[in-house]
C-alpha cells in the first residue's frame, strides 16, 4: 500500500468519526424551569480557588443561600427568570444560561448573559463541582466578587488573612535647620493572622515589621545623619474583634512594641504594652471606626519611658466595582514630651481597588497623609503610602 492510499484511508476514517465526535461535544440548552430549579434547590456548589482554597456555596429551595470562601461568609439569593438562573451578587441579579453536554450527561456549562463568560461544572446528587473559575471581578455561584471582598477587607474584624506590603515616602518639617529638606523611604511588612471563633468573632495577631531606608536623624550638631538601611521597632496587637448583627464593630485586646531597632537612634530599647479597644460601624454605605490604644514601658534597658496614646482611625466608602475612598492614618499623643509638643495628627485620604487576579483577591491602595500637628523641632509633614495586599489562605479557618 503506497503512502497516498494510507493518507486517503486516514482521511476517510477521520471524516466518519467527526459526526460522533460532534455529538459527544454538543451542548444542549436547559430551558425547562423545573430542570433549572432542580440544579439549584438544596444543592452544594464546590470550587477550588487560587492557593487551593475551598469555596463552598449552599443554595436552598426557597431561593436563599450563602457562600463560604477565604474564611468569610457571603450572602446569596437565586431565582429562575425565563430560561436563565439568576444569582444576586453585589445587589444585582447576574443571569446564566445553562447547557448540558449530550455526550457527558453529568457535565454542564453556565454562560453569563451580557459577557459570554462561561464555566463548566459537573453535577452529582445534591453536589456540583465547578471545574474552572471565572476570571472576573463580578464573582459567581462559588466565587466572591471584588466588591464583596473589598467590603470584607475594610472590616478589621473580618477573618480574612492578608499579607500587607506598605511602601511609604515621608517628607519632614521642623525648626531645626534643614528639616524641610529631609525625606525618607520606609517599608512596613504586616501580616494579619485571624483565628475564627464559634461565636462569629475572631482573635487577631497583627505584627508590623518596619524597614527604614536612609532615615534622617538629628545629630545634635545642627544637622542630620542618615542611618542607611535599618529595622525599626516591631509593633503588634493581639485582640478580639466582632461585627454584630446590627453592624457595630467591637473589639479589645493588647497592643505592644518589641525593641528590635538596629540603631539606638531609631528606638528606645524598651518593651511596650497596654490595652486597646475597637469601636466602629459598618453597612452598605461603608465603614468607619477607630482603634484606641495606650502603651507603657514594661521592660528594657533603654533610657526614657514609653507613655503613648494612639488612635488609628479608618474609613472606607464604596464606589462600585471594588473601588473605595479609604484611608487609615494614626493619631498619637506622647505623654513624655512637653505639654505643647505631644500631638501628632495626620489627616488622610486615599483610593483603594480590590481585584480578583488569577482567582486571588488583591487590594491595592494609595493614601496621602498631611500632618497638621506634630513636634516643633523635627517631624513628618507629608506621607504617601502605597499598599499591595494579597489575600492568602488561613487553613485553620477552613470550614468554620
Image (tube, rainbow, N blue to C red):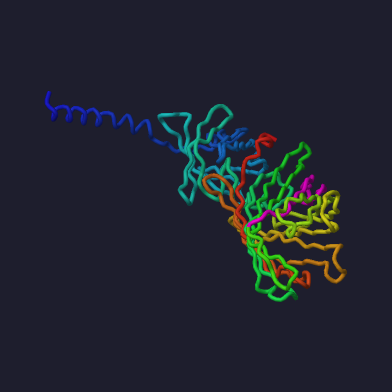
- In terms of secondary structure, what is the magenta stretch mainly? strand
Look at 74% across and 44% down and name the residue there: 205
**Residue 221 shows in the view:** yes
Region of the chain picked out in magenta, as a range? 229-254
Which one is nearer the viewer's eye here, 232 or 193? 232
Name the one closer to the observer, 154 or 140.
154
The image quadrant where one finds the N terminus is: top left
Q: Above or below — where is 47 with respect to 124?
A: below
Furthest toward the front, the residue is: 221
Q: Count of labels shown?
A: 0
Residue lying at 50% horizontally and 37% vertically, measured from the top left: 32
Relative image position of residue 113 (x, y in whole percent): 49, 48
- Up/down of 9 relative to 369, above or below: above
Position in image of residue 230 (x %, y %): 66, 55
Residue 144 is left or right of residue 375, and the answer is left
Q: Is residue 350 visible?
A: no
Residue 122, compared with residue 171, is above or below; it is above
Membership of 234 in magenta stretch = yes
Question: Can residue 67 be found in the magenta stretch?
Answer: no
Q: Spot the residue most to the top.
A: 1
In the rendered image, residue 372, in percent from the top left (x then y), is placed at: 75, 71
Image location of residue 71, percent across then percent down: 67, 40
Dividing the picture into quadrants, the one containing residue 183 is bottom right
Q: Residue at x 70, y 35 (%)?
A: 400
Displayed quadrant of residue 232: bottom right
- Judge from the rendering whether residue 3 lies leftward or rightward of residue 394; answer left or right: left
Pick whichever, 26 or 285, lies toward us: 285
Amino acid at each position: 500500500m503506497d503512502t497516498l492510499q494510507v493518507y486517503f484511508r486516514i482521511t476517510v476514517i477521520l471524516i466518519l468519526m467527526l459526526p460522533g465526535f460532534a455529538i459527544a461535544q454538543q451542548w444542549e440548552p436547559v430551558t425547562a424551569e423545573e430542570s433549572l430549579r432542580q440544579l439549584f434547590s438544596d444543592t452544594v456548589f464546590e470550587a477550588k480557588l487560587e492557593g487551593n482554597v475551598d469555596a463552598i456555596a449552599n443554595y436552598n429551595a426557597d431561593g436563599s443561600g450563602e457562600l463560604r470562601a477565604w474564611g468569610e461568609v457571603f450572602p446569596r439569593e437565586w431565582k429562575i427568570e425565563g430560561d436563565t438562573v439568576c444569582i444576586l451578587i453585589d445587589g444585582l441579579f447576574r443571569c446564566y444560561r445553562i447547557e448540558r453536554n449530550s455526550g457527558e450527561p453529568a457535565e454542564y456549562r453556565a454562560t453569563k448573559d451580557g459577557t459570554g463568560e462561561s464555566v463548566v461544572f459537573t453535577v452529582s446528587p445534591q453536589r456540583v463541582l465547578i471545574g474552572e473559575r471565572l476570571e472576573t471581578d463580578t464573582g459567581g455561584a462559588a466565587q466572591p466578587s471584588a466588591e464583596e471582598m473589598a467590603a470584607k477587607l475594610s472590616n478589621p474584624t473580618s477573618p480574612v488573612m492578608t499579607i500587607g506590603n506598605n511602601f511609604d515616602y515621608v517628607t519632614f518639617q521642623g525648626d531645626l535647620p534643614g528639616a524641610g529638606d529631609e525625606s525618607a523611604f520606609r517599608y512596613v511588612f504586616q501580616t494579619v493572622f485571624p483565628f475564627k471563633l464559634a461565636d462569629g468573632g475572631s482573635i487577631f495577631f497583627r505584627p508590623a515589621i518596619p524597614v527604614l531606608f536612609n532615615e534622617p536623624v538629628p545629630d545634635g550638631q545642627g544637622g542630620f545623619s542618615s542611618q542607611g538601611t535599618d529595622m525599626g521597632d516591631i509593633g503588634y496587637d493581639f485582640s478580639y474583634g466582632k461585627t454584630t448583627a446590627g453592624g457595630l464593630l467591637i473589639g479589645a485586646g493588647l497592643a505592644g512594641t518589641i525593641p528590635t531597632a538596629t540603631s539606638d537612634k531609631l528606638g528606645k530599647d524598651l518593651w511596650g504594652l497596654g490595652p486597646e479597644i475597637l469601636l466602629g460601624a459598618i453597612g452598605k454605605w461603608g465603614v468607619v471606626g477607630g482603634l484606641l490604644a495606650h502603651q507603657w514601658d514594661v521592660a528594657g534597658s533603654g533610657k526614657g519611658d514609653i507613655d503613648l496614646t494612639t488612635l488609628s482611625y479608618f474609613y472606607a466608602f464604596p464606589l462600585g466595582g471594588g473601588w473605595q475612598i479609604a484611608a487609615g492614618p494614626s493619631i498619637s499623643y506622647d505623654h513624655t514630651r512637653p505639654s505643647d509638643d505631644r500631638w501628632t495628627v495626620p489627616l488622610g485620604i486615599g483610593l483603594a481597588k480590590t481585584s480578583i487576579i488569577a482567582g486571588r483577591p488583591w487590594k491595592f491602595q494609595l493614601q496621602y497623609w498631611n500632618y497638621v500637628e506634630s513636634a516643633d523641632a523635627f517631624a513628618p509633614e507629608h506621607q504617601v503610602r502605597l499598599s499591595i495586599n494579597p489575600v492568602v489562605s488561613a487553613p485553620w479557618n477552613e470550614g468554620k
